[in-house]
Amino acid sequence: MIVLDHVSKTFDGGATYALRDVSLTINEGETFVLLGSSGSGKTTILRLISRLIEPSSGTITLDGKDLRDYTATALRRNMGYVFQGIGLFPHMTIGQNAGIGLRLVGEPAPEIEAKVRRLLDLVGLDPDAFIDRFPGELSGGQQQRVAVARALATDPDYLLMDEPFGALDALTRESLQAEVLRLKEKLKKTIVFVTHDIVEAFLLGDRIGVCNAGNLDQVGTRRELLRNPETDFVRALLARPLQQLEAFRDLQ
Amino acid sequence: MSALSHFASVIADNGAELWLRTGQHIMLTGVSTLAAIAMGIPLGIFAVRYARLERPMLAGIGILQTVPSLAMLALLLALLQQIGALPAIIALTLYALLPIVRNTVTGLQGIAPEIIEAARGVGMTSAQRLRLVELPLALPVLVAGVRTAAVVGVGIATLSAFIGAGGLGQFINRGLALSNTDLILLGAIPSALLALAVDGSIAAFQWGIETRRRAREGMRVYASWIATALPALILLIGGIAYWSTTGGGAARQASPGAQIERGTLRIGAKNFTENLLLAEMIAQLVETHTELRVERRFGLGGTMIAHNALNDGAIDLYVEYTGTALTVILRAESMQDPDAVLVRVREAYDARFALEWLTPFRINNTYALAVRSAVARERGWSEISDLVPLAASLRAGFTPEFSERPDGYPGLKTTYGLRFGRVYDLEAALMYRALAEDEVDVISAYATDGRIDALNLTLLKDDRHFFPPYFAVPVVRKAVLERHPQLRALIAPLSELLDDAVMRRLNWAVDGEKKHPAAVATAFLRANGLLPAIAEPALQGAR
């Protein structure tokens, strides 16, 4: 369980806030989606959770313990992180990339290879075909599957995914979304998923938090958001896909 | 004989020394480049980690780079108070630092921020990030920096010969001093080839590393291992060449604060024919008539370098000139009376340096202005004053030392009011050739130079008696004379035998007839009964 308690973050000494007084609880085993446009603060929340940055005020606890009481590296090794963009290491093979977390904790090489093969299989890549290739030789979708495998390698309790499919074409994105749903059922991990895509948020999220200019406007299930939008921003945001759908229908 | 087979014979004649000098050259460059890598990469990492350090650090190292190589060598010589490999290696290391630090910084900064974020995000510590991600990704840029440093180092290392560190520069140095093109090429061609080999080997190293990362098996893996080992192989060859010929002796020569080793006399010489000849004669006398072993530290690149080496005990003896000591070392006004000058320098050296001036040779190698004889006849020039009205239209070629010394051009300007239209700084051997080939009209010749007669030059009379006397005199450390008082009597007979005319003839035998200084010295000493007719001279170097 991750709890943010009145957390704010400023990068310029208080002139502007990337995140303002956010309180939020992410429950064990749920998939929590942070939804918002760019600059809304959703990625900031993710980076705070993995301690890539520290809050300016407020506290974050993980399983009841203050985040600052964990070693940053140990904390990150227990949180699989799938980065916006790609974030694979270009000089390492797919096998080395996927197994890097295991290598960092000193796992013996044969066991790493065995695990990496299972993981590649899990994310839908043929281990024999891919394990010795380099990221540059793979398509964007394949690379993102590797990134997911890398995040899962250490069998972390938490999985942080920062717009992992943002740069992919619609078809690839759909198949990877389906993959995440499948993994979610299978692995029962707590997932924090950042996206600007409302459809993706509704598809994947058990609960959704709507971020707007550094504030967390509303948190709820998709049903709660649709039935009872608490701010004008949330209402407008949720109305947009329907408007788009109607515009699409008019064209036909 | 074709040029190629001629050069092959030059190589064959100097095979053993070429092997030694190549070894020394590789060691000088290799050790300094490795030291620069060991310091430069951590410095570059620091500069990137602590961004505030980056600009001052690169600026500081950049300034080091702008110090001219010879000035840097001279400076280190003064600071370390010793000649030989150590100051040379330090200078080379400082020069190698900039490309390595700068490329380390550039390489690390060039890594995409997302990659760094990913490395942190997967839980790497700072050290793991450096080792597993940053350095491997920066490697190509980093290796390019090492390549630049090593290739430039091979070039600069040729200058180390000026401070007695050996290397292929020794041939170039000696070739320049003796006007011997074969010797210059014997140093220049191998050092150019070495630079190419070093460049190629480091490129191969990089290819090897990258290939090994990608290839798992087959011929490419073997090839990559071999490629990676090439730089080490060159170092190994250098090490073998060096130790097989010296047994590490050259390293001992450079030991700090060198005391007089019992039984060894280290004789220095400045980098020109006459000084080398006189030093060689003394060396052969000592080798033949005493139990002392002689170490020749020839080719020292200037008066201050030779004097500092003597004063600091890096050498025991060299031949200095009275006028030079008076004006350059003691910084006194120049004087005309030869005896007064000798008394003055002898007393000052005794009081200030614990160095003794022995009996002077009767050689006055004073400066003189020289012109082409044909031109002198045509225009009626016989003394320096004749040049004054025309000076603005004349081209002068001076050695850099003459341009600076108070008893050189600056003094000439005040005494005669001479101001030449153009003044070129020329290395001594080139200076004579430039005059003979009408590239310049007047040069700063040495009165005992054999080329004066051979190239049909005329010395202009110093009608205002400006140039002080420059009598050649062996200067010896007093501590050495106390231990070996017989040196005085051993060297004294040379004073009786040598005068300006004899010296000019001997100088020409080397400069003009291209005989080896050691052979010329031996022949002269034998002819005058100072060496037994059958004694084998200590031949070294070129024909």
Image (tube, coloured by chain):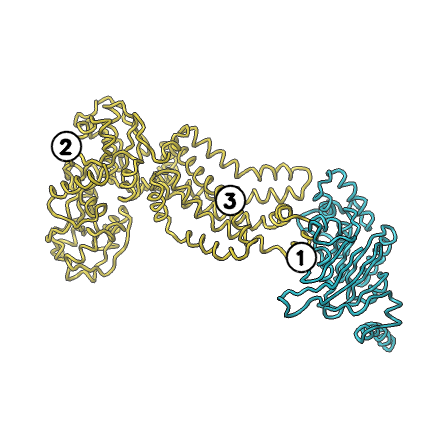
Chain colours: A cyan, B yellow
Residue B497's disc number: 2
- In the rendered image, residue B359, in percent from the top left (x then y), is placed at 15, 34
Viewer-proximal residue among B103 and A104: A104
Residue under pointer 1: B114
Name the residue at 48% across, 42% down: B35
Does residue A15 appear left or right of residue B235 in this picture? right
Q: Which of marks 3 and 1 is nearer the N terminus?
A: 3
Residue under pointer 3: B37
Amino acid type shown at disc 1: Glu
Q: Is mark 3 on a helix, strand or loop?
A: helix
Q: How far apart are marks 1 and 2 (CA)?
A: 81 Å
Q: Distance between the residues labelled 2 and 3?
A: 55 Å
Q: Is residue A149 above or below residue A13?
A: above
Q: Is mark 2 on a helix, strand or loop?
A: helix
Residue B197 shows in the view: no
Q: Give the crowd class for mark 2: few <14, some 14-19, many >=20 residues within 10 Å.
A: some
Q: Nearer the viewer, mark 2 or mark 3?
A: 3
Name the residue at 51% across, 44% down: B37
Chain letter belonging to callout 3 = B
Amino acid type shown at disc 3: Ile
Chain letter belonging to callout 1 = B
Q: Distance between the residues labelled 3 and 1?
A: 28 Å
Residue B225's disc number: none
Q: What element carries label 1?
A: helix
- In the rendered image, residue B454, in percent from the top left (x then y), is placed at 20, 43
- In the rendered image, residue B136, in percent from the top left (x then y), is placed at 61, 47
Chain letter belonging to callout 2 = B
